[in-house]
Structures are given as C-alpha cells and as structure tokens.
Image (cartoon, grey):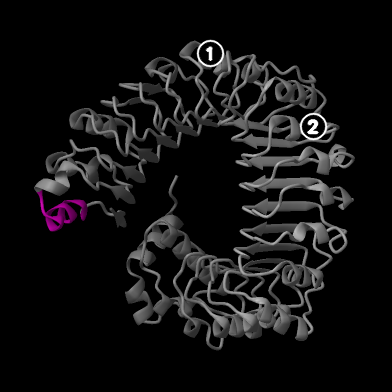
Amino acid sequence: METLADRCLLFVELHLEDVLQYNQLKNLPEGQLSDLLTFLLSQRKQGSRSLTQRNLTHFFSPSLQELNLQDFWLTDSVFRNFPCSELTYLNLNGCHLLGDVGINEIAIGSPHLTHLDVTGCGRIGGESLISIGSLQFLHTLSLEAKSLEESAIQEYLNSNPKLGRLRNLEIHRATNLPHSSLLSFIQTVSQIESLLISLTHSCFIDGLPTICTSLTYLSLRECNSITDLNSISNLPLLTHLSLIRCHRLKEISSGLNGRSIQLQQLTVAECKKVSDYHLLPEGLGENLEHLEIVGATFGKEGVVRLKRIVGVAGKLTTLRLLDCREVKDELYIQVPKEVRIRHLGVAFNKLRDGQTIQRFGETVEELDLTGTNMQNSQIEISLKDMHKLSRLILREAHRVTDGPISRLSNKCLREVDLTKCIRLELPQLMHLPYLEKLTVCWCPKLIGLIIIDCPQLTWLDLSGCIQVKEDGLFSMLSTSGGKMKSLWLRDVVSVGLDNLRLLPRICPRLEKMNIAKCRVMQENTKEEVLGVLAKCRWLRRII
C-alpha cells in the first residue's frame, strides 16, 4: 500500500530540477537527504532519468554512509573533492568511464570505506590499486582486472598496501594476469575468508592453499586453465565451493575426498567435461545445506551416489538439480524425516513422476521446474501440499496446459513464471491474495488471461504472446489492474490506441510500460501515443 511519504518522494522525483534550482534540499535533515538519494537511485534502476551525473553531487554530504551507483555512467570529475568522509559502502559496479583519478579522489575523501565494488570499471590501473591499498578499514573488495597487467601489480606491491582487514575478495576478468602476479596480489590479503575469481587463464589454484589458509568460500567462474581440484584438499576450513563454466575441469571428487564431509554448500554449473561419477565426492552430505547441480549428465552410478548423499543430508535446505540429462531410472530420493527443503529445483529431462517433489511439500517456499517434462497431473500432485510456496517457476515446461495453472490454490504465492509454456491458451488465476508478479512470456498459443481475486498484482509481463486478444486483455486489467505498476506488452500486436486511452483509469498507479512492436506503435506516431499515456500520472518509463 502506497503511503503519503511514497507519493511525496515520487513528486520530488518528477520535479527534481525545480527542487535543485531553488535550492530546496538545504533544509532537509541529513537522514532524509540520504533516504531521498536512495529512492532516486532505485527509481533510476527502473528507468527513471531524473537523477543525472550533473545533479548527483547535490546529494553528497559528510554524513552519507551508503552509496549504490551501479551502472551509473560517471566520469572522474564527479568525485573531485569527494566530501563523503563517513561513507562505508560504495558500489561502482558498471561505471565504465571511471578511472584512476576518480578512484584516488574516493580513497582520499572516504578513508573509512569497508565495502568497495569497482567491477566493470575497466579503466583502473596501478594507481587505482595503490589508492585501494590505502583503505585500511576495507572488509569487502570486488574489482575488475581486465586492464591490469603485471606492472600494475608490481606498483601495488611496492606501495606497502594496508588491507589487513580484508575478508572478502572478488577478482573479475583477470585475463591478462599471469600465475605469479595473481598469487602475489592475493598474498597481500592472505587473511581473506571468501574468494571469487572469474575469467582467468592462470592455473593459480595450485599455490592457493599455501597462501589462504583461512579460506572458507571459494568460487571459480570460467577459469579455463583448471583441469582438477587436487590442491583444494589442502584448504582446511573450506565449507562453500562454487564451480561455474569451468569448461576444462574433468574431475571434482578426487580433490574433495577427505574434505567433502565439511562442505556445507556445493554448486556445479555447466562444467561439461565432468562426468556424474566424478561430480559428487564420497563423504559429501552430512553437513550439506545447499546442493545445486546445473547442466550435468547423470547415469545410473551418478543417480545412486546422489541418492546416497541426499539420504544423509539432514541439514539440507536448498536442492537444485536443473537441466540434468540422461537419468536412466526414476529419481525417488529417500531423505531423513528432519530434512526441511525450502528451495527446490528439479527438472530432469527424464523424470518419471513428481514423487521427489511431493516429499518436500510441507516446507518448500520456492519451486523451480525449469525445463521439466512432467505432465499436468504430476505437477498438480507435487503442488498439492505446498502450503508455504511463494515462488513457482515453470519456464519451458512444454507439457503444461491451462488445467494445473487454473487450479493453483497455494495461498502464499507471490510470483509465478510461465515463460515459454507453449501449450497455454487461456489460463485462469483465481483467489491468490498475495500474488504480486506474473510472467507469461513467449507463449505462442496464449489468447488471454482470466485473473480473479488477485488484489496485490503489481507486475504483468505478456511479452511475445502475439495471439493475445486486445479486448480480453483490457477487460482483465479493468478488474485486476488497480495496483499495476509494471506492464510489459512487447509484441502483443493487438494493442491499439482506443484501449490504451483506458489505462489512466484502469491502471492508475502504472509506472513502467513496454509497448514495443504493438499495433499502436505502427498505426500512430510516437507523439500521439505519448500524448495518450501522459495522462498516466505516475508513468515514468515507456519503451
């Protein structure tokens, strides 16, 4: 429910230039100024362009503590004489124009930073590393290493860095750093407990155990020089391991044997050369809380081992087995009674029935069946006892028809995703009091939706549903669009100007809309369409 404060913030956003022109911000208390900036930045992520590089500096103040400027195209000049001396959190992810000068100004102006993300700042070099190295309170650092070379690392090493409090480190796109330079950099922060490395050709992992003896979390993404994990067994405290798109990796189990019993989280995604036998190590399961396998090929031996691991995983809360192929027999996993799965994803191409899912019905809050080949009856049986289910994902569930969707009765559902369910025609969603987000994209046979008693619906995406009938769509919006904030109708070709004129009345809170490639854009000028939509008082983003 929108409050008066929400409306006031929206009003300020719509008239920001006037507010700044007449210097209306000077009388705001520091806390309210920070709240206003946070709101404007969140609106910018959703498409608003009221906050720009030019007027952003009006919000910089010594008392500001958190600043999220992700994907803001900022130049170094914005941070000249940066006044935010109490800033502790700064996210500059995706600020592609930012370079050494800007990073140096930030390090001078905000010496108490504890969290800094400069991923995507592709222009940083040795000078930026030296500036970052002076931030003695830094606890979490994420940086882009694409432009860093061996000489930059040497400059950093010679500057006597003071990162003794750093615990979490992410290094992205380390494509130009050789083995020795990457290890030399990590050696200056040997006390780290969490490490993420992506896109490196360096086989640095062999030297890691002798440097980072406190490491508990290790994530390797697209590290294409790594073929095995034998050295991992020498990391005594490792509890979380994530391996994503390491295409030359052939074996996982041998590197984890002996340490696997302490693993609490294991994620293996799209490591295509790892066979099912070498995927899951012996001993895994006793302390396991999170198991996620994506894109693996399971044979009979792999299924047997998987059953055995989950069968002893009494602490398991997240189980995702997505896009896994070649399952030879039905995967019915016997699990301890104390297991309480909250996040479940199962989409084996040859899964015979829904027993695996049904077993966890009473505790599941999120169910991901992307790519499942289960039939309507199997899905209905699986959903029957899921009284706590809040998120249902059925992307590319090609056997699903209108029936199980129309009979959804999970009262806690907040989000339903039916993208590319190609057999849907006219599903009904009824009596879902908390449903907020409904995605029904690229369903070629869909002609409409019937939505009854879903009073909290704020997001509807029908992109790519080219057969949707205009009259039925706007009839549905007239009864269920009262709180609609986001409406995505790309490629819904039937939408015309006459019905578009109804939106200010039937969707009075609409903020974002996509009508690209609709009939209305082909038959009318852009100015005519914008003139009609101008009556939607809160609409700020039109595509």
**Residue 396, placed above or below residue 29:** above
**Residue 388, placed above or below residue 380:** below
Front position in the image: 76 or 322: 322
Q: Pinpoint residue 225: horizontal percent, then vertical percent.
A: 68, 55
| Magenta segment includes 388 | no
Q: Is residue 344 left or right of residue 397?
A: right
| Magenta segment includes 526 | yes
**Residue 264, placed above or below residue 372:** below
Front position in the image: 18 or 345: 345
Quarter occupied by residue 31: bottom right
Q: Pinpoint residue 542: horizontal percent, then vertical percent.
A: 28, 54
Q: Amino acid at mark 2?
A: Lys
The image quadrant where one finds the N terminus is top left
Q: Pinpoint residue 395: horizontal percent, then vertical percent.
A: 46, 31
Q: Tell me the residue that label 2 is attached to.
A: 315
Quarter occupied by residue 446: top left
Q: Amino acid at mark 1?
A: Gln
Residue at 57% over, 17% down = 382
Q: Which of the numbered marks, if any, corresponds to residue 163?
A: none
Q: Which residues are magenta?
A: 524-534
Q: Nearer the viewer, mark 1 or mark 2?
A: 1
Label 1 element class: helix
Query: Can you see residue 27?
Result: no
Q: Pinpoint residue 374: horizontal percent, then vertical percent.
A: 51, 17
Q: Which of the numbered marks, if any, corresponds to residue 378?
A: 1
